[in-house]
Image: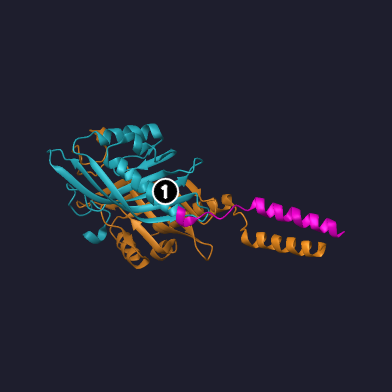
Chain colours: A cyan, B orange
Amino acid sequence: MQRKLVFTLLVLSLISAVGCNRKPNLDEARTAIRTADAEWSRAAVANDVDGFMTFVSSKGSMLPPNQPAITGTSAIREWVSAMMSSPGFSISWRSATVEVAESGEMGYTTGSYDLRMQGPDGATISERGKYVTIWEKESDDRWRAVVDTFNSDVPPPAASAPGDTLDPMAK
Amino acid sequence: MQRKLVFTLLVLSLISAVGCNRKPNLDEARTAIRTADAEWSRAAVANDVDGFMTFVSSKGSMLPPNQPAITGTSAIREWVSAMMSSPGFSISWRSATVEVAESGEMGYTTGSYDLRMQGPDGATISERGKYVTIWEKESDDRWRAVVDTFNSDVPPPAASAPGDTLDPMAK
């Protein structure tokens, strides 16, 4: 009778132990995401398309302003290659917020970017803006961007008329 | 001796059961996020500022294009109120992707929005774009937006010169 009880409890303990994932270390996860975000920016600064792409998930989407979403690594690679080879182009960014889900496999960063590119008249256009990246820890334990989107902090140079921005308080 | 073993196993079972959260129902969580996103859009369509704000976390940030981030419910309320009371303004959106972390307390939606507002000449400006919202399930079990950002799918009307968009392939 008591032997049966011991056996039952032993089985229950095992089931609990197996069914229950170990709690992920969220500080470690946040550090890993912050590091991935910083290394991703360094690859962008270096105009390193291959390096850039190592941080993009195979199911990744980029959502840049003033054009439709770009989905899939081959379309993203094409877009990034074209951008990095355009004259005067440079971009860097820095995370401000890094958050991670309690399960430790999904997280996000927000931060600000600095972009330079050559305008139509050859002069350098500088733009500061903000971004949101959603990260997932993939099966090889590396964090990659599944969604990345950004937009400018300032109205476009040509659009200084009221009504051209989404800020009605600016009128 | 065996009684001691039974007691030990009983304690171990209880520790496992308490230390181990029940696995959240992720289908339910995705449905809840999708529903919150749709109800949030309906509040926006109805120009219902109070209704809109019930979907914004107290630690929420809105990251609209062409202006700095707006952080905190009072600043977000002021921004939304001004936008909803501006002539000819209307917005609605529809989620396309709904994802949730395995822990069931963080998730995100992406989708497309339709925006109308009155331009400087009184004519209606229509804009289609995309958005990303990061959701958290808060202590009252309601999902609220902690980060919301969006941008247009098309170049701004006044900025048709090459170099004004971030798409070098459009040149």
Hey, which quadrant is residue B43 in on the image?
A: bottom left
**Residue B45 in sight:** no
Q: Quadrant of the C terminus of chain B?
A: top left
What range is drawn magenta here?
A: A1-28
Residue A24 as seen in the image, left or right of residue A117: right
Rendered residue at 27%/39% (across/down): A46
Residue A3 as seen in the image, left or right of residue B10: right
Name the secondary structure under disc 1. Answer: strand
Q: Quadrant of the N terminus of chain B?
A: bottom right
Q: Depth check: A47 or B47 in front?
A: A47
Amino acid identity at mark 1: Ile
Rendered residue at 47%/50% (across/down): A106
Residue that extends furthest to the bottom in the rendered view of this protein = B74
Query: Can you identify the residue that label 1 sits on?
Result: A134
* x and y percentages locating residue A127 in the rendered image: 22, 48
* x and y percentages locating residue B77 in the rendered image: 35, 65
Rendered residue at 57%/49% (across/down): B27
Chain under label 1?
A
Q: Main secondary structure of the magenta part?
A: helix
Q: Depth check: A171 or A99 in front?
A: A99
Rendered residue at 25%/61% (across/down): A169
Is residue A45 rendered magenta in the image? no
**Residue A113 in sight:** yes
Above or below B148: residue A53: above
